[in-house]
């Protein structure tokens, strides 16, 4: 059998190890027949093999071990005494078990091997109070290898009295000698795993033949975990040395040394990969306990749930499995309790009474993604928002600017729970924040995606290992730092001579990235380094952590490379900005930045943006363009039309062929929804030639509802502070102003939104009525 099921393979390996120990224990028991410790140990081993055999449906194996267990039980309880006949019967049982294991390994099944004779021998020992078998053959001695044992031709008792004087016995015979026979191997030998053959075949190599395939037991060894950890540390040091050597040779012009270094680089990479594989274990090791969790909890809650597992062979570093176990268990319990509805509720909603909970694991971009997906009721964002308002987690102004994905992130707030009552499963407000914290401690991220009525997906993205990771190296004030690659979304270069520079809102730095304000953290300021000029060229590393996106301002971006994570000294840990250290390819020590800590520092800039009303806060918009307001200037035909920037959620560009029609209205598919679209040219009575392949649009979103305002082009973003205003207006306009020496029309945003979606504000008002906070301020827009 070339490929064994993982469970069967593990069973074979452990059983072979146990049988070797049984040989030694049974021989020792003959010398110490009254040893309770030996009897108990032998009984437990046979009982374990019997139990697993029954679970795996190996009935012959189960029957043989059951007979041996019965005899051992009498010996252990003192009902009869250990003697030579009992020892012979038990040793023969051990050999028979070996033969059955060999058949399972070779063929995937137990085959037709005779087990009745050994069962009769063991039974005879039980029935005979003196322990003498009535009519059963004795087991072969260790020297008599390869005697066929079948139902038609049982071994002769003479074999015991006169063993064949072949070669001297070896403590561990070669595998081929055992495999060549269709019978149990002699005690102390390897498991037989081949077809019937004459006794005493030559050992591998004696006649020039190739050795036979190794058994499962011979192909597996147990290694101390500490030894693996030490080996991993040595490989880490080798990787660091490799990086330094590669960088040094790249500055030289010796072709021979270059080729040798390339070869060393390749070998080091292969060695690193091989050593890492020794630490990798399938995620099924923690998944294997979850069926019982789902079964017990669903029974307790009156649910009908089918658990599906996809990608259970996906491997993780063993050090990460323990960190993932508790968060994963909590997500599964949460899905059973909160996600999947009771059978009657599901049936009333047109679903099957049985819900499906799917665990999925797969590799993506050098990381492992683990998903917990249910087909339940989904998460109601309105209910989450109402709970957040009630508990003071957010304000109404903040909620007005939040999209559905942002609202769902509130579930990770400490103490947040939407459970209506406290049970032994949920409702205490301890859970999702702990999940997030534990996953982020190992450099991972947590996300949630939910569709009401359809279900929810909780997604964990975690690194393959914590020992060696991919990192982006940067420079700030002549010092080098490493950023874990998993946290980096993109890099932006800011030209000091450009007009698109870093801005400040209430003293906090921000950068306008594709029409949205990105809160910034200056690394030099955070680390207390000399602050460079804000006018110089800088890089912004756009990072994702703590459920928010922010930019980290650095002087230079160097490169990406594999780094070996080394622990920090206690003094540096207390600073709270670093998560480790490493040695770079140039031999310099670099500190690894704690992205979660930096994300918390970006909160100051984010709050400043909110207070200044620059984050799309429609509830504070008056529609009147006054001093200090920012405007998005768009082109509609040959006209310039200004849109208050706080009415702009984002800027997009849709291909023309993606624009479709519903009745008399135009729509576009956007982020899984049908987005109504209005062309400002039509609204304002301008009809420019539509000759482009794509259409720029301004997207406005509120409380999960969005509209798209199509324009001809995006011209600029300006500060409206020293402009001349006029109250001259027209349909779709609120007035005009002179901006950048050009007459610019002010868009009536409310009318434009209603032209795209006539029910937009009714839905928003209904939301406000249900969950607090009015939108009367919008009436002036």
Image: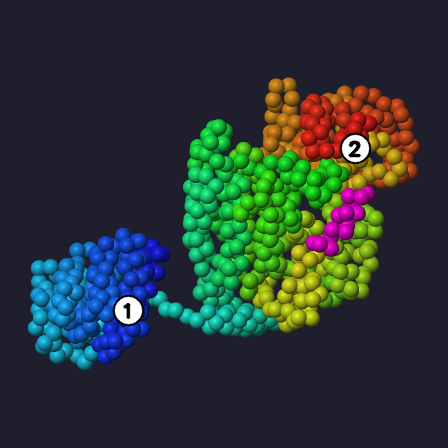
Q: Is residue 682 above or below residue 653?
A: above
Q: Is residue 88 left or right of residue 569?
A: left
| The residue stretch that appears in magenta | 599-612
Q: What element carries label 2?
A: strand
Which label sits on residue 728?
none
Asked if the magenta segment contains residue 609, the reply would be yes
Q: Quadrant of residue 577?
A: bottom right
Most frequent secondary structure within the magenta stretch: helix
Depicted 430 relative to depicted 37: above or below: above
Quarter of the view holding residue 122 = bottom left
- Cα gap from disc 1 to disc 2, whole angstroms: 83 Å
Q: Which of marks 1 and 2 is nearer the N terminus?
A: 1
Characterize the local packing of mark 2: few (<14), some (14-19) or many (20 or more) Cα atoms within 10 angstroms: many
User: Which residue has dot 1 on it?
Assistant: 42
Q: Which residue is located at x 79 percent, y 26 percent?
A: 779
Residue at figure coordinates x 66%, y 56% from the top left: 596
Give how far across and how far down residue 634 sits, in percent: 77, 33
Q: Could you tell me which quadrant the C terminus lies in?
A: top right
Rendered location of residue 380, percent (x, y) = 60, 36
Circle 2 residue: 643
Q: Which sits in the foreground, 351 or 36?
A: 36
Q: Where is residue 381 in the image (x, y as percent from the top left)?
A: 63, 37
Q: In which quarter of the image is residue 568?
A: bottom right
Quadrant position of the N terminus in the picture: bottom left
Q: Is residue 413 above or below residue 114?
A: above
Q: Are marks 1 and 2 in contact (CB under 8 Å)?
A: no
**Left/right of residue 152 with respect to residue 743 in the rendered view:** left
Q: Determine if residue 214 is in view.
A: no
Task: Find residue 92 and report its horizontal and vertical position in percent.
Answer: 18, 68
**Residue displayed at 69% across by 33% down:** 771
Name the residue at the bottom extreme: 168
């Amino acid at each position: 059998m070339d490929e064994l099921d993982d469970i069967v393979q593990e069973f074979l390996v452990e059983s072979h190890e146990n049988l070797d120990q049984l040989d030694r224990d049974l021989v020792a028991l003959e010398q110490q027949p009254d040893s309770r410790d030996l009897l108990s140990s032998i009984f437990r081993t046979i009982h374990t093999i019997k139990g697993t055999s029954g679970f795996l449906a190996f009935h012959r194996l189960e029957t043989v071990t059951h007979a041996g267990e019965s005899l051992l039980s009498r010996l252990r309880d003192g009902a009869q005494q250990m003697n030579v006949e009992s020892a012979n019967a038990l040793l023969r049982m051990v050999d028979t078990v070996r033969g059955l294991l060999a058949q399972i390994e070779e063929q995937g099944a137990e085959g037709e091997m005779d087990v009745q004779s050994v069962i009769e021998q063991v039974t005879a020992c039980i029935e005979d109070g003196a322990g003498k078998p009535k009519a059963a053959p004795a087991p072969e001695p260790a020297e008599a290898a390869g005697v066929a044992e079948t139902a038609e031709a049982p071994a002769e008792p003479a074999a015991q009295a006169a063993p064949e004087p072949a070669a001297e016995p070896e403590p561990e015979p070669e595998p081929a000698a055992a495999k060549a026979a269709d019978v149990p191997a002699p005690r102390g030998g390897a498991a037989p795993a081949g077809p019937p053959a004459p006794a005493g075949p030559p050992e591998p190599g004696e006649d020039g033949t190739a050795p036979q395939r190794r058994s499962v037991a011979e192909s597996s060894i147990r290694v101390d975990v500490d030894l693996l950890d030490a080996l991993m540390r040595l490989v880490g040091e080798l990787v660091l040395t490799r990086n330094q050597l590669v960088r040094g040779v790249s500055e030289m012009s010796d072709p021979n040394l270059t080729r040798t270094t390339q070869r060393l680089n390749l070998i080091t990479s292969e060695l690193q990969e091989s050593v890492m594989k020794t630490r990798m274990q399938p995620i099924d090791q923690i998944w294997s306990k979850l069926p019982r969790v789902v079964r017990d909890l669903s029974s307790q809650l009156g649910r009908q749930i089918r658990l599906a597992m996809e990608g259970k062979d996906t491997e993780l570093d063993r050090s990460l499995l323990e960190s993932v176990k508790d968060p994963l268990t909590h997500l599964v319990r949460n899905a059973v309790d909160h996600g999947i509805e009771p059978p009657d509720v599901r049936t009333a909603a047109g679903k099957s009474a049985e819900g499906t909970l799917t665990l999925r694991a797969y590799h993506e971009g050098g990381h492992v993604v683990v998903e917990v997906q249910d087909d339940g009721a989904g998460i109601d964002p309105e209910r989450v928002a109402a709970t957040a308002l009630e508990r003071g987690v957010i304000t109404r102004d903040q909620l007005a600017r939040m999209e559905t994905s942002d609202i769902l992130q509130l579930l990770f707030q400490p103490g947040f729970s939407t459970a209506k009552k406290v049970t032994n499963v949920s409702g205490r407000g301890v859970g999702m924040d702990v999940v997030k914290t534990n996953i982020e401690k190992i450099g991972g991220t947590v996300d949630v995606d939910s569709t009401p009525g359809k279900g929810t997906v909780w997604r964990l993205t975690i690194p393959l290992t914590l020992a060696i990771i991919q990192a982006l190296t940067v420079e700030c004030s002549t010092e080098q730092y490493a950023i874990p690659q998993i946290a980096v979304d993109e890099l932006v270069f800011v030209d000091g001579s450009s007009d698109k520079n870093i801005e400040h809102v209430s003293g906090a730095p921000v950068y306008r990235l594709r029409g949205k304000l990105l809160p910034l953290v200056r690394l030099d300021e955070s680390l207390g380094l000399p602050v460079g000029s804000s006018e110089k060229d800088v890089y912004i590393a756009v990072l994702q952590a703590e459920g928010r996106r922010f930019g980290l301002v650095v002087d230079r971006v160097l490169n990406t490379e594999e780094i070996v994570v080394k622990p920090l000294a206690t003094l540096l840990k207390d600073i709270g900005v670093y998560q480790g250290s490493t040695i770079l390819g140039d031999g310099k020590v670099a500190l690894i930045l704690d992205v979660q800590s930096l994300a918390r520092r970006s909160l100051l800039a984010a709050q400043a943006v909110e207070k200044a009303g620059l984050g799309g806060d429609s509830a504070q918009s008056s529609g009147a363009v006054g001093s200090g307001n920012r405007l998005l200037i768009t082109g509609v035909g040959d006209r310039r039309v200004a849109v208050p920037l706080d009415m702009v959620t984002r800027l997009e560009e849709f291909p023309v062929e993606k624009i479709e029609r519903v009745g008399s209205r135009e729509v576009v598919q956007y982020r899984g929804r049908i987005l109504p679209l209005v062309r400002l040219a039509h609204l304002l009575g301008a009809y420019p030639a539509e000759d482009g392949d794509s259409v720029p649009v301004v997207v406005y979103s509120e409380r999960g509802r969005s509209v798209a305002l199509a324009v001809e082009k995006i011209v600029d973003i300006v500060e409206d502070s020293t402009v001349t205003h006029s109250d001259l207006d027209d349909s779709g306009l609120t007035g005009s102003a002179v901006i950048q020496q050009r007459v610019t029309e002010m868009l009536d945003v409310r009318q434009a939104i209603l032209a795209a979606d006539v029910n937009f504000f009714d839905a928003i008002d209904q939301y406000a009525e249900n969950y607090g906070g009015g939108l009367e301020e919008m009436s002036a827009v």
